[in-house]
Amino acid sequence: MEDESVQERHAPNSICFGCGPANEEGLKIRSFPIENGLRMTFETSDSHQAFPGMINGGIIGTLLDCHGNWTAAMAIMAERGEGHPPCTVTARYTVKLRRPTPHGVPLEITSQVESIDGDRAEISMVLTANGDVCAQGDGLFVAVKEGHPAWHRWH
């Protein structure tokens, strides 16, 4: 279903602050497949501001991190030909804040798979508001194995 995000479909009980559908206090991002990646739209709230009218950089980082992580999980799942994504964690991510990100307008984030090497995926992310690039990021996300503390977090 197009109206069901990858998070809602594959990890409905997740409590992650950024992407967990079950976290009532969280951001509850909703990512949807596009060619070679994912897309999402996010509506900010007043509590996400750093100063009046502009979004906090930590919120921006969380949006990019969680969206990139899900992009990697879905890409690794497709690469392996599996029906459920592996649990992935962030090994590294960077954020470049290009300009102040405005509050009160939809934030659009797209991600692209740059490379996959076994259980690792390199992902790039771009956040725009009103058609302007406000932030960019890239990250390395890794599918964890049984025994890792995050192994069962999506199940």
Image: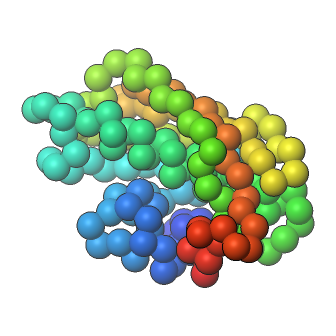
Would you place residue 1 above or below residue 135 in this image?
below
Residue 131 seen by the camera = no
Residue beneath the point at 79% across and 63% down: 77
Q: Where is residue 133 in the image (x, y as percent from the top left)?
A: 45, 23
Q: Is 72 on the left-hand or right-hand side of 130?
A: right
- Position of the N terminus, as image quadrant, is bottom right
Q: Is residue 108 left or right of residue 73?
A: left
Residue located 53% across and 30% down the image: 94
Looking at the picture, does residue 86 appear above or below residue 134? below
- Between 145 and 124, the one nearer to me in the picture: 145
Q: Residue at x 41, y 18 (%)?
A: 98
**Tag count:** 0
Q: How is the image coloured?
A: rainbow
Measured as percent of width and height from the top left, residue 6 is found at 59, 65
In the current view of this chain or complex, which residue is farthest to the front? 147
Q: Quadrant of the C terminus?
A: bottom right
Q: Position of residue 144 (x, y in %)?
A: 71, 62
Q: Is residue 46 visible?
A: yes
In the displayed structure, does residue 17 sit left or right of residue 114? left
